[in-house]
Amino acid sequence: RCQSTSTDEKTNKSRNVLDNASNLLTNFLSGGSIGSMPVAEGAVSDLFGKPLFFSLFDWFIEHGSVYKLAFGPKAFVVVSDPIVARYILRENAFSYDKGVLADILEPIMGKGLIPADLETWKQRRRVIAPGFHTLYLEAMVQMFANCSERTISKLENLLEAKNSQGEHEIELDLEAEFSNLALDIIGLGVFNYDFGSVTKESPVIKAVYGTLFEAEHRSTFYIPYWKFPLARWLVPRQRKFANDLKIINDCLDGLIKNAKDTRQETDVEKLQQRDYKNLKDASLLRFLVDMRGVDVDDRQLRDDLMTMLIAGHETTAAVLTWAVFLLAQHPDKMKKAQAEIDTVISEDGITLESLKKLEYVRLIISESLRLYPQPPLLIRRSLKSDILPGGCKGDKQGYQIPAGTDIFISIYNLHRSPYFWENPNEFEPERFLVQKDNNNIEGWAGFDPSRSPGALYPNEIVSDFAFLPFGGGPRRCVGDQFALMESTIALAMLLWKFDVDLWSLSPEQPSILRTDSSANSRTDLAEKIEFSSTSHVRVGSVDMVLDVIELRSLMFHKH
Ligand code: HEM
């Protein structure tokens, strides 16, 4: 065994030597590199005051869709071109790993799908992806609706309580409310655990938020001090982080044990027949335990659950917050959505069929993801030297990159690129219905909804990688349909009951959700507003969403 390891090491070393040699040779033959990549010199001041990806956009317009950003000794390549993104994510996907992202997430997610090494990923993806079967999603629709109803009742109760005190205003951090909603949904859908976070606080919920907060801190701090051996004991916030992780892990371990202890052959049969409707527990955990048998590795299961808890939570909260924020500024679009919702939703509830009819609401969700993608960047590191293909606008030549190159694929830049979108900064959900051909954009197949028949939402296939809120290629988001369906249902139910309105309390916080607790539906509300227009709920801290994705420290990491 020892010998074979050292043989492996030798093979790896000789591979590296070969890689380097081929790099040198290619550089020599091409006179330095294949096309000399434009370089944007970053000033340290660019790292402060605004999220990094805003600067990345300015440099994209200035330097083109593939450029090198150098900050002192560290450099990385920024990609804002669909052809190049498609190449890295899909065509040559296995020549890249998650680089610094994996370094940051590994302490939290272990070998979960997002940071997993290639071998683990291949094995786990094969097991997890079938869990998100269409029939599973169908079975989740009612749960999405029930959880949304809890949030709506909470807003109504809060308003009612205020009204009874003669006050007609409440201030509410809507992003936090959507976070609670998304946490409850992910808990129930993935491991049949009701966090109940919309209505109460618990140590587990606090621990989940603590962990998210630490992940954010680590992605924005310059020196990875948490890697020092004693940091875990000496630094209070690291002690807290270790404690938070323990609380969540204990909770997940308990759920896994319970799922294994309660495994029943009759459930396995139902799962095999995809008979989710007649299962008491249709969660993904049940699927993973039942379909794989009791011998599935607990540690790996826990990493998988933790990954989905983190990956499927703030992302969904963000899209809902931004959708409300955008609708508040576009009352005409809100009215159009409400007209659609009124014809689809009834007191009987919402089904998969209703979701299919909510076309405009689905487009609103997609358009919110286009304007405010979360995450705004995908991170990769090249495992070997490679040649990036020429892009479709301006950058016709390919570029040589050495092994170990850190790459940011800017989803934000792609989604707001003036080359692929008309009025890229405008909120126009209707844009996704219009086919856009590639007359003047070489190499890009254009935007064509018919390219993905049957898909309820636009995706990277219809846009040939100009729209990729869920990434693309083999490491594409595994929970995309889950997230899209829950967001559509939550938004539709909210708009059915409430108006979202621009209240202009202050220029910083312009968007307001206005309602009246005594109205039974939005239609009643429209009349009530005439008489009592002072009840409203304030949309809080949308800027927070942008802050979460700052990635300043990454540039100073060694590879
Ligand atoms: C991966 C976005 C919701 C689970 C990804 C990736 C993106 C993304 C862009 C690709 C990352 C990369 O290539 O580096 C989103 C957005 C969501 C969302 C915008 C909500 C609006 C969810 C939900 C779940 C989930 C609800 C689980 C229930 C995952 C997992 C991966 C992933 C496990 C890793 C997939 C792999 O590497 O095989 N997500 N996601 N996501 N997402 Fe999501």
Image (spheres, grey):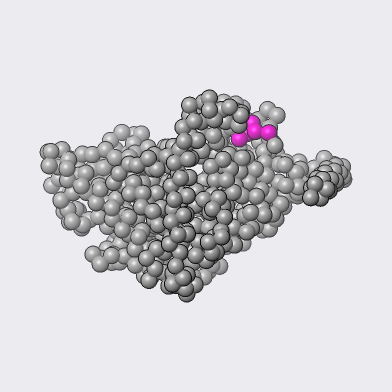
Q: Magenta segment: does it hold 253?
A: no
Q: Which residues are magenta?
A: 554-558
In the rendered image, the quadrant that contains the C terminus is top right
**Where residue 432 sits: x, y (%)?**
47, 60
Residue 388 visible at all: yes
Residue at figure coordinates x 32%, y 55% from the top left: 147
Residue at the (36%, 58%) spot, across then down: 144
Q: Position of residue 82 (x, y in %)?
A: 62, 53
Instruction: State the image coordinates of residue 483 (x, y, percent, origin top left).
Output: 44, 56
Question: Residue at coordinates 36% horizontally, 34% vertically from top-left?
Answer: 508
Q: Residue at x 67, y 54 (%)?
A: 119
- Residues 168 and 63: in front is 168
Residue 400, quarter of the rendered image: top right
Q: Quadrant of residue 338?
A: bottom left
Q: Position of residue 94 (x, y in %)?
A: 69, 54
In-image side of 457 versus 473 (left or right): left
| Residue 50 in sight | no
Instruction: In the rendered view, tell whether residue 473 sits above or below residue 60.
Output: below
